[in-house]
């Protein structure tokens, strides 16, 4: 029975009880996403500060802001790097193994975070160009973490709690966003207390001060710390047994790794005298084959398109929270604050939204995903994101009145709750579960890259679209846009399409990875699903 040893190995993985190693894997992989979120979102906290430092116009009644092309580059270049990294490391993870490239992504994050803070130059243009260079490579490393972390966690998990484990890894993003807010508040408050800079309207030059140039550098460089703390543990992780058995075709090594890290005793192929696993020819098709298209084409379209649409809305909101808060009057006018006061208040606003909306949404998903399923959570999330977007957009003038600002923030926070108790979590989880092992990281990388393409559209498009329709009221250097109200309406429609395309995505809850992908029919014949599996 050539496939029986392999079947036993995979069955024990699916039926293994939650152990210490599962928790360690969540923390090690999750700290990568903590770093990812900190690095990707902290740039939104310091863009206004960069405008004050490097693009101040003498005699202007308002503090300097980044020119449109510079703002788009600084906000979007890491996303471009992330997209490239998702495709490259996803493919590489399937070719040479998940573990082999897992440390490279983290090292890229560490070096690039430090490099971002050390972006120097003789002119503002040179500083921004250097910053963009390092942030591209930072994004490249971050991109690799998406397919690798999701795939590693999926392949180590049992089928009963797999969704919760993958969701917990992704949920560390919420804590990364909180950390970005805390660090920015702490650094800006410290510098303000020491140097006591006045408001811009009192002293335009003194309101920023030369010390401000250290603030944004410190915030960006601290992104290297959690990655550095995780590097050793990540390098000690063994290859996943599923990759070793199904792709590398070394069931003996897979058995040894399982015994070592999970305390699961599995007889190796060599010990039982069995032959090496014979792969069913019907399952040897390639990624670009008609057979893959027939079996998984609609699935890949579903995972990629829903992630694409989700990230248009999600990143538009997240990267430009400060602009939305300013538009509804939750943040005072920039000329009434010093640079450090403005940074502190933007960071505080982002922290509160993350604390009350983003983080709870992530962890509600962790607790419920293996009970109500990925499909239901994604539909519910897209539905309520649509509802709340339209609630914000249709009576937009109502929300701009000062007495209604708190109501706006509450509803805005609910859109984040249902993004994270919804498609922002499930679009990450499902691609790691529904494709064959030899394509798993690649297909996850393709889906994630589609998401980042949506994030780039959201980041660049929203920057221009949300500008006032009245040319006299737009930010310097921008053309007139469609206004915040219409921009929110567009985002609401994007969520409608995400809801509809969710029906292309299958439900993997409670099923083994091999059953969902139809990858190993020998395993299914040796151990059919049903009473035997259900009794575990």
Image (spheres, helix red, strand yellow):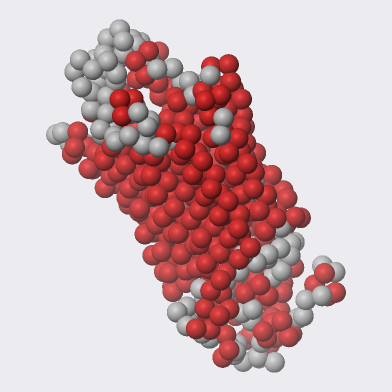
Residue found at the very far left of the displayed protein: 122
Outermost top residue:
202
Q: Using the image, determine if residue 382 lies above or below residue 416.
A: below
Q: Quadrant of residue 60?
A: top left
Name above or below for residue 305 compared with residue 458.
below
Residue 333, how many percent across, how many down?
Answer: 40, 17
Residue 10 in view (yes/no): no
With respect to residue 515, does 216 lie above or below? above
Q: Residue at x 40, y 37 (%)?
A: 482
Q: Is residue 451 above or below residue 1?
A: above
Residue at figure coordinates x 24%, y 15% from the top left: 205
Residue 168: percent from the left, percent from the top? 62, 50
- Residue 91 or residue 7, whichever sits in front: 91
Between 76 and 115, the residue placed more toward the observer is 76
Q: How many marks?
A: 0
Query: Residue 409 or 269: which is nearer the viewer?
Result: 409
Q: Nearer the viewer, residue 334 or 107?
A: 334
The percent coordinates of residue 195 (x first, y second) are 33, 13
The quadrant of the picture occupied by the N terminus is bottom right
Quadrant that contains the C terminus: bottom right
Q: Residue at 53% of width from left, 19% of height from top? A: 401
| Residue 130 showing in the rendered view | yes
Q: Is residue 485 left or right of residue 533?
A: left
Q: Residue at x 27, y 9 (%)?
A: 203
Instruction: Find residue 212 and report its horizontal and vertical position in percent.
Output: 30, 23
Residue 364 figure quarter = top right
């Amino acid at each position: 029975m050539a496939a029986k040893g392999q079947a036993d190995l995979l069955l024990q993985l699916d039926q293994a009880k939650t152990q210490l190693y599962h928790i360690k894997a969540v923390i090690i992989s999750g700290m990568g996403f903590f770093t990812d979120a900190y690095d990707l979102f902290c740039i939104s906290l310091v863009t206004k500060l960069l405008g004050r430092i490097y693009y101040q116009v003498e005699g202007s009644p308002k503090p300097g802001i980044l020119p449109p092309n510079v703002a788009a580059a600084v906000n979007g270049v890491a996303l471009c790097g992330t997209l490239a990294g998702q495709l490259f490391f996803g493919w590489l993870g399937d070719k040479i193994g998940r573990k082999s490239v897992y440390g490279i992504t983290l090292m890229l994050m560490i070096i690039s975070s430090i490099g971002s803070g050390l972006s120097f130059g003789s002119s503002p243009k040179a500083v921004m160009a250097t910053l963009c260079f390092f942030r591209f490579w930072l994004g490249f490393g971050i991109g690799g973490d998406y397919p690798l972390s999701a795939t590693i966690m999926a392949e180590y998990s049992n089928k009963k709690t797999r969704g919760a484990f993958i969701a917990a890894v992704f949920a560390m993003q919420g804590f990364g966003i909180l950390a970005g807010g805390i660090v920015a508040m702490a650094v800006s408050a410290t510098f303000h207390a020491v140097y006591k800079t006045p408001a811009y309207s009192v002293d335009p030059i003194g309101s920023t001060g030369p010390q401000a140039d250290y603030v944004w550098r410190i915030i960006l460089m601290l992104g290297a710390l959690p990655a550095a703390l995780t590097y050793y543990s990540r390098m000690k992780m063994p290859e996943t047994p599923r990759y070793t058995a199904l792709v590398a075709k070394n069931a003996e090594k897979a058995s040894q790794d399982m015994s070592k890290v999970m305390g699961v005793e599995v007889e190796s192929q060599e010990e039982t005298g069995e032959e090496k696993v014979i792969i069913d020819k019907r399952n040897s098709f390639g990624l670009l084959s008609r057979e893959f298209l027939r079996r998984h084409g609609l699935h890949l379209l579903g995972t990629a398109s829903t992630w694409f649409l989700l990230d248009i809305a999600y990143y538009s909101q997240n990267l430009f929270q400060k602009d939305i808060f300013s538009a509804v009057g939750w943040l005072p006018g920039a000329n009434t604050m010093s640079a450090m006061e403005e940074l502190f208040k933007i960071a505080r606003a982002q922290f509160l939204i993350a604390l009350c909306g983003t983080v709870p949404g992530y962890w509600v998903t962790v607790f419920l995903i293996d009970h109500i399923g990925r499909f239901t959570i994604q539909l519910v999330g897209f539905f309520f994101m649509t509802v709340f977007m339209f609630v914000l957009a249709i009576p937009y003038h109502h929300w701009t009145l000062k007495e209604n600002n708190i109501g706006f923030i509450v509803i805005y926070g609910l859109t984040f709750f249902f993004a994270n108790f919804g498609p922002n979590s499930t679009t990450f989880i499902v691609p790691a579960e529904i494709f064959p092992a030899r394509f798993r990281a690649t297909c996850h990388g393709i889906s994630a890259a589609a998401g980042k393409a949506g994030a780039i559209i959201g980041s660049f498009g929203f920057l221009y679209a949300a500008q006032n329709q009245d040319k006299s009221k737009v930010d310097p250097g921008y053309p007139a846009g469609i206004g915040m109200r219409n921009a929110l309406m567009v985002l609401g429609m994007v969520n409608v399409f995400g809801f509809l395309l969710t029906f292309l995505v299958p439900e993997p809850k409670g099923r083994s990875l091999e059953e969902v992908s139809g990858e190993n029919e020998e395993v299914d014949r040796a151990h059919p699903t049903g009473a035997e599996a259900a009794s575990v």
